[in-house]
Image (spheres, helix red, strand yellow):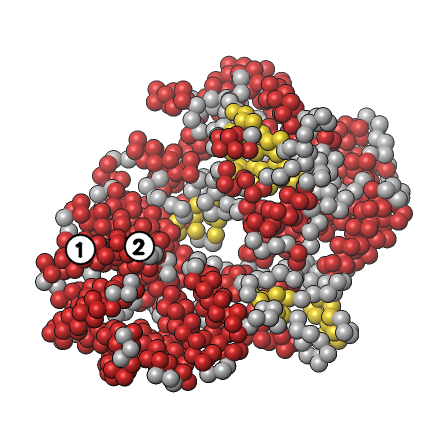
Amino acid sequence: MLLHFDLLGPLTVSRDGRPVALGSTKQQVVLAALLLRPGEAISAHELMTMVWGDQPPASAAANLRSYLRGLRQALDRAPDESRRILTTPGGYLLRVEPDERDLDRFDAAAERGRAALAAGDPAAAQPELAVALGMWRGSVFAGLPLPRLLTSRVARITERRLLTEEDHAAARLALGEAAQVIPRLRALLDRHPLRQRAWAQLMTGLYEIGDISGALAAFQQARRALAEETGMDPGPELTRLHDDILHHRLGQRSTTTGPADDAAPGRPRQLPLALPGFVGRSAELDLLDAALGARPERAATVDIVTISGMAGVGKTTLALHWAHRAVDRFPDGQLYVNLRGYDDADAVSPADALVDFLDALGVPVGRIPSSVDARAGLYRSLLASRRMLVVLDNSRDADQVRPLLPGVGQCAVLVTSRDQLSSLAVAQGARPLTLEVLTAAESTRLLRTRLGADRVAAEPAATSEMIESTGRLPLALSIVAARLTARPTFPIDAVAAQLRPSESRLEQLADGDVRRVFSWSYRTLSTEAARLLRLLGLHPGPDLTGDAAAALLGRPRTAVTPLLQELTRLHLLTEHLPQRYALHDLLRSYAAELAQASDLAEERQAAARRMYDHYLHSAHPGAVLLQPTWAPIDLEPPMPANVHVPMPDRVVAAAWFHAEHPVLLRVLRQAADTGFERYACQLAWTLAAYLSPRGMFQEQLAAQQAALAAAQRIGDVRAQALASRMLARALMRLGDEHAAEQHVRRALELYEQLEDLDSLALILRQYTEHCTQYGRLDEALKHSAEALRVSQLIGNRYAEARALNVKGYLHALTGDYHQAVVDCAEALTQQEAIDDRVGQAATLDSLGFAYHRLGDPARAAVCYEQSVQRFQESANRYHEGLTLVRLGEAREAMADPPAAAEAWQRAIRIYDDLGNPAAEVVRQLLARVAPGPPGR
């Protein structure tokens, strides 16, 4: 029996015409995520992110399993049906048969219509396109609250519908049905006023029914919509069409009635709209013609040109102008991607870019390989026999570009970057093209094109001054031109005066630096918004919240909200996630220079202290919630009037650290380097409470290295001991035995010097663990006994129980399993009495190990399961993975292969999430009990 999955409207599933109940809203969102990537394995972590966003609740994993179980019951109800949702090593996979999705049927009908339209048969195209559009019952997944990661995929499907609407209009115009097309085009443009092809079709249709004034009015509507929303004029095709209508010379225009550019299957036309009014760059265009032009006699090699230069110099504009001009040289199509290399919040990985390219080349989503290397290999194979242009825009470095380069064939590649990409010239033979600012004559021509020749000629002196004030930087010229275009009565001299520099400004202009591009926007800010922008230059990034901005400014959160909105409106700040703001890297440098020049050193220091105080006294309560058994540290006193984030429970604390830990790493390093060493040391402790249990040892290493250097600079012995201890643990987990031992010994010496017996007991237990990991069991037993002695001496029940467990585990490792059980059982009793849940988890793991070695795997499994549950409660994923491996071994010894496989699969998912190479070892264990195809 075939299932029908209907996405093009409210999500419905039917079997033999009868609806299938899909359960709760969240369960339907899970199905929606799977339906958007049929036949592709999606990891549990990725599914949770799709469904709940970047901060899933603590119950997300359990909820996801429940939703998948419900969907399986709904979709697999017929007894003769094979399973639809499969569990694979890569995650969960939805099996969809051909034509079961209405989206696939829509694409097929639309493709048949486009093919007929391209062949000049609009009569055959019209019914196919009408059938395709008739499948839509509303917006994709109408009524479902889709998270951000799903809306981007839905937007691509919506774009396919809009292209089909335009193709349908083209077919009906070609059939002489202009009167019937016009209402649909008006409705489309009401919703999507920037679609220039649809405007052209509307103008053509109005002209054909004799409504010349209506056609001309439609052009004015298009111009206003484009100016208001993009600051740009209509493109050359729309402008030519307007001129043809104005002079009554409109004929049958293929550009308005033909199929969309990407009509041919596997022959993509992805180039974005080229900026109208391109001027100059004749030498650069000649170089591109020579380097990338058609040369039939050449060998089957790929030509590459890299366009580099400063921000705003027009790299993308040049690349797109040449690409559109040379489109006929690449009959097999053009691929384009904006790699967003300098956008920390949204950089496009080579893996994601390859998915888009393979999709455009006609590879079904379900057949796109999962690894980057496999995707790149398939991509190169598809391009090997084609003549295509590949435009890789805004790349960060050569590593981001290399997987996207074709291997052999007749393709050409155009790369833009702020980086010179010298290694591409050395290794791949790329030809570099360095772009400079425009000449004065070219700058004047640009302004004439945008503003009109009469307006420029009326104010030659102001025009020349404005050109020089912008340093002839195309981006800066475009900004002032757009501003003047939107204000037709505004004199050029007014903008020139606003950009007129002081002596220091002249010095900046002489450098030709991009900071001049931002100055005119800065000068339009209110006084408080300008001050906030300057202080944002003190923040290390990569982003910040409104609370952090309020702390920097020293104002209540409510007072900062309108200032953030002002900065966002003027594109000086980007709200890339709800309530999270990113400052462009160049703008951050510019803002910091403004702060240096405009604000007193005392004011900058006070703002920095408020920022560090905000992060420390927001993070510390969260860290205590995450690690309630950790020994407390002395803190810098909180600033009473400052903004701090409340931490009511562990869930909120974990979510806050999940979002903020990349920021905290930068903040503590900056604090260490700018005279706020105590903040750096204390922030490192709070970060450890989040990083260490999650196995994020590289980040832990970086944090503690900065903290140790800061503590050494100010001679704080206690902070040095703490950082050395935590640094040693990170190094041990990363496998650096020598360095870890150096730091654990140094911490031991410092705690002895401080006569801090509580910390001494802790470092002795850590030294025991260190020796155990590297097989030095005799040393480990000695340190374990000393840790127990010190713990008993000071009467610290928590430390004593922990030490007893360590001692018991060592007895198990040396073969004395009965003594191990005695010690660990006593430790567990003490830990239950003081409710040390994390300690219980470790002790139950030790007991499981001992019972298994005593030949009682069933009792061992019970201990391991209880241990896993407690590690989950504390989000200690690293140790949860270790215990799951042992649980699988116990289940295997009990002759229960399915249970063993389940435990090992859970461990693999954890290790994969943590990037831990132990995942491969566990996969080998899994192969012993599940040698067949995974998920079957």
Q: Position of residue 9 (x, y in %)?
A: 70, 62
Which image quarter: residue 71? bottom right
259 shown above or below 870: above
Tag 2 residue = 736
Residue 235: where, in percent of width, then height? Answer: 68, 32
Above or below residue 914? Residue 712 is above
Q: Which residue is mark 1?
A: 746
For the residue pair 678 and 390, the one nearer the viewer reads as: 390
- Choose between 417 and 788: the one closer to the eye: 788
Front residue of 153 and 556:
153
Q: Quadrant of the N terminus?
A: bottom right
- In the image: residue 795, left or right of residue 420: left
Amino acid carrying label 2: it is Asp
Q: x and y percent of residue 28 in the render? A: 61, 68
Q: Kindly state the secondary structure of the residue where label 1 is placed.
A: helix
Q: As shown in the figure, which amino acid type bears the numbered disc 1?
A: Arg
Residue 124 visible in image: yes
Which residue is rendered at x = 32% and y = 45% of the image? 553
Q: Residue at x 72, y 30 (%)?
A: 329
**Residue 633: % across, % down:** 20, 61
User: In the image shown, does 209 or 668 lie closer to the viewer?
Assistant: 668
Side (left or right) of 806 relative to 308: left
| Residue 225 seen anywhere in this rendered image of the structure | no
Q: Which mark is residue 541?
A: none
Is 869 rendered above or below residue 122? below
Q: Is residue 700 left or right of residue 274?
A: left
| Disc with the residue nearer the chain's start (2 vs 1) | 2
Q: Which quadrant, please, contains the C terminus? A: bottom right
